[in-house]
Structures are given as C-alpha cells and as structure tokens.
Amino acid sequence: MVTAELAVALPALMVVVAGALALLVGVAGQLRVTDAAGVAARAAARGDPAAAIVAAAQSVAPSAVVTTSRAGGWVTVVVRLHVGLPGPAGLAGVEVAARAVALDETSLQDTGVDPAAP
C-alpha cells in the first residue's frame, strides 16, 4: 500500500521542488540586477565613462545588458539579465530587469552647485 501511494506522490513532489528551485533562481537573478542597476546608476551619476558604467554593472551581474539615459538632471540605468532555469535543456529561462535613477552630478557642476554640500 505505501509503495503505491509513494509512486503517485513522488512525481508531484518533484514538480513542487523543481518549481521552488526555479523560483529561487529567478529571485536571486532579480536581486543581482537590482544591485547592478544601483551600482551602475551611481557610476553614471558621477560622470564615469560608458565602459566603466557597464563594467560596474557586470561586476555584480555578469553578462548583463546595460542601457543608460540622461534627462532633466537625472540619469536612468536599466539592467537586463537572462537567467537560465535549472532542469532539462528545453527550459528557456526568464529575463529579469531592474531600473535605477540617480541625480546627475555632472549637471550640478554646470550650475555651480556642490553635489557634496549638505
């Protein structure tokens, strides 16, 4: 009796465990891109070159795609990363993304305002 019940319940348990593992991998990827976007936005706000901004983001989330835009005294950085899910090779994975916005310190230098002043 127990063997038959285990044979029925075990596949369902494996599906639940695989789903939980995939969710965990996706959440970890989302946390990485969120941190990478913040690091890259700080670098962009300081006026670092584009290569340094991408390098800053990729130091936290390797192989991430980074886009930067400036408008109205603000700098916006979007970081995207493809996260492969565990399991058979047929699973495509998901793309996670995060956006961070920071005050563009280079625009403050043009106005004579000291960005380090309280």
Image: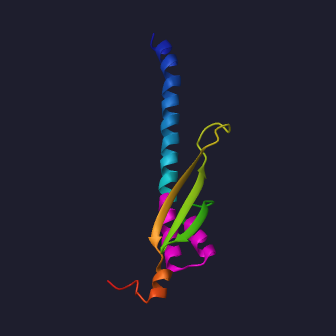
Can you give x and y, in whole percent of width and height, for residue 95 in the image?
58, 49
Can you give x and y, in whole percent of width and height, for residue 108 in the image?
45, 83
**40 versus 89 height, above or below:** below
Q: Residue furthest left?
A: 118
Q: Out of 13 and 101, give the one closest to the viewer.
A: 101
Left or right position of 95 against 28: right
Residue at image coords 50%, 12%: 4
Q: Out of 3 and 12, give the one closest to the viewer.
A: 12
Q: Out of 23 and 53, give the one closest to the viewer.
A: 53
Chain part drawn in magenta:
34-59
Can you give x and y, in whole percent of width and height, for residue 63 in the image?
63, 60
Residue at image coords 55%, 51%: 96
User: Which image quadrant: the N terminus?
Assistant: top left
Magenta highlight on residue 31: no
**24 versus 106 height, above or below:** above
Magenta: predominant secondary structure element? helix
Residue at image coords 50%, 24%: 12
**Quarter of the image where one finds residue 90:** top right
User: Which image quadrant: the C terminus?
Assistant: bottom left
